[in-house]
Amino acid sequence: MKYVSTRDTSKTFEFKDVFLKGLADDGGLFIPKSLKKFGEEEIRDFQKLNYSELAKKIIYPFIGNFMSESDLGKIIDNSYSVFRKDNVVEMVQIGDRSVLELFHGPTLAFKDVAMQLLGNFYEYYLSNNNQKINIVVATSGDTGAAAIDAIKGKKNVNIFVLHPDNRVSPVQRKLMTTGKYENVFNIAVKGNFDDCQNLVKSMFSDKNFSNQINMSGVNSINWARIIAQSVYYFYSYFLVKCDDQPTNFSVPTGNFGDVYAGYLAKKLGLPINKLIVATNQNDILHRAISKGSYQAEKVSETISPSMDIQIASNFERLIFDLNNEDDVQTSKDMRNIKEIGNYVLDNQKLNKIRENFLSVSMSENETLEIISSVYNKFNVVLDPHTAIGYGAFDKYNLSGNNIVLGTAHPSKFPDAIFRAIKTNADLPNELMFILDEKENYDMIENDVEKVKQHIKDRL
Ligand SMILES: *Cc1c(COP(=O)(O)O)cnc(C)c1O
C-alpha cells in the first residue's frame, strides 16, 4: 500500500515513512492512496477469529514491506499479552446498549490498544536499522501515559511527553510521571492541550531541529494508531450482531482519531450505520457537523479532560474526503482554518458527512447525571468520557445494535466520579502503587524555544 499527504497527492510514501514521521512535511496528514475493501465473505469469516488474529488480518494490508506477516503476528501477540483480558477488549450490556470496554491495558484507556503495538513497531524497526529516534508527543492526559508505557525501557528510543500543567487528572499524571526509566521525559507546559499540540507541531516543522534530534511522533494523527483502532470496530461488530439490524457506534471524541478509525472500518467494508461523534462542551466537531461551522473557541476545562480540544487534528482527513481527495482545495481549507479560524461546510458537504456521522455535545451536568443514573440503575460506574458516549444515544432514536466505546477506566477520574455518585472509583490492584510513588517531571513555559532547548539539554 502506498500513502499520500492530504495536501499533496503527487508524492507517494511507504508505511515506514508514514509511521515514523506521523505528519507529512507539508503539514498534511498521511492517507492511503487507495483502499481495498474486504469482501463480504471475507468479513463474515472474520467472526471466527480471536482479537489478535483479526488484528493481523486487518493491519497487514496496510504495512507493505515494513515487516513480514509472521513478524507482524508475533508483534501483535506480544503487544496484546499485556492486557488484562484475553481478547484485549470486553463487551458489557448496560441497559439497551452495549459498552465496549477498551481500557483493560496498562494505562486504563483505549489508547493502549494502538500504542502497545506502536511501541513494538518502533523497537522492531530501530533495532533492524540501527537507528535512534526521539518521540515528542503532546497529551491531554491519556496518550502520554499510553505512549510512555509502550516505549519505556526500549532501546534506541527516547520519549518526551508534553502535558498541560494542572489540566490532567492526578491519576493520569501519576501514570506518566512515576516510572523510573532513563528514556522517559515528562514536561508540564504552562498552557492547555492545544498549546502542547501546537508546540509539537512547530518543533516538527522546524526541520533543523526535528532532523537534528531525529524526531518522531505518536499523536493521534499517526496512521498506525488509526489502523490499530479500526480493529475493535470489526471485533465488536460481531459480538453484538444479531439478525440484520443496523449497527451504530457512539464514540467519545476529541481529536477525531478514534471515530475516524470507525469510519475507516466502514470504508473497509464493515456495514456500520452511523458513527456518533460525542463531545463534551468543547464541541467544535458538533458545531461543524450540526451547523456547518468548524470554528475554534476557547478551550474550557471539563471533567472529561481527554476531550478538551478545539483543534481536532484528524478532521483534516475527513475534509480531504469531502473535497473528493483534492489536495489543493484541502491545503486551501487548512490554511483558512489556520489564518481565519473558520471552515464553513455547505449543505452538500453536510449531507455527505451525515451519511456516516451524527454528533452530540454534552454539558458537565448532563455528564454527571448520566454517570449517576447508570450507576443507580445498573450498578456500573462509567468514566466521564464513556458516559458522554453512552448518553449520546439518548439524543437520537437509533434502532438496532448500539455500541458505546468505553474509552477509559473510571478510576482515572476519581474526582468526577465522586461528584456524580459519592463513591470512590478504585484503581485496579496492579496500579495502586502509583499513588505513593515519587513523581518526576519538569515545568516549562509555553514557549517553543525553551522546550527545544530543554529537549536538547536532555540528549
Ligand atoms: C483520547 C481520548 C478520547 C478522544 O479520542 P480521540 O481519538 O482524540 O477522538 C476519548 N476518551 C478518552 C478516555 C481518551 O483518552
Image (cartoon, helix red, strand yellow):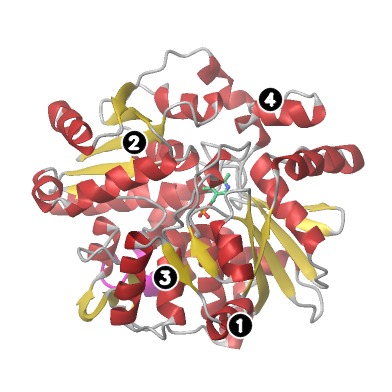
- Give the percent coordinates (x, y) of residue 49: 60, 67
* Magenta span includes 229: no
Categorize mark 1 by other alpha carbons within 10 Å: few (<14), some (14-19), many (20+): few
Boundaries of the magenta span: 60-71
- Give the percent coordinates (x, y) of residue 451: 22, 33
Mark 2 lies on residue: 161
Q: Earlier in the sequence, mark 1 or mark 4?
A: 1
Query: Residue 351 shows which numbered tag?
Result: 1
Amino acid type, residue under disc 3 in the picture:
Arg
Amino acid type, residue under disc 2 in the picture:
Val
111 or 169, which is in the foreground?
169
Q: CA distance from mark 1 to mark 4?
A: 44 Å
Secondary element at image label 1: helix
Answer with left or right where residue 213 lies relative to residue 188. Answer: left
Q: CA distance from mark 2 to mark 3?
A: 25 Å
- Give the percent coordinates (x, y) of residue 52: 52, 59
Mark 3 lies on residue: 317
Q: Are discs 2 and 1 less than 8 Å apart at CB?
A: no
Ligand 1 neighbours mark 4 (CB distance < 8 Å): no
Q: Quadrant of the N terminus?
A: bottom left
367 or 61, which is in the foreground?
367
Secondary element at image label 2: strand
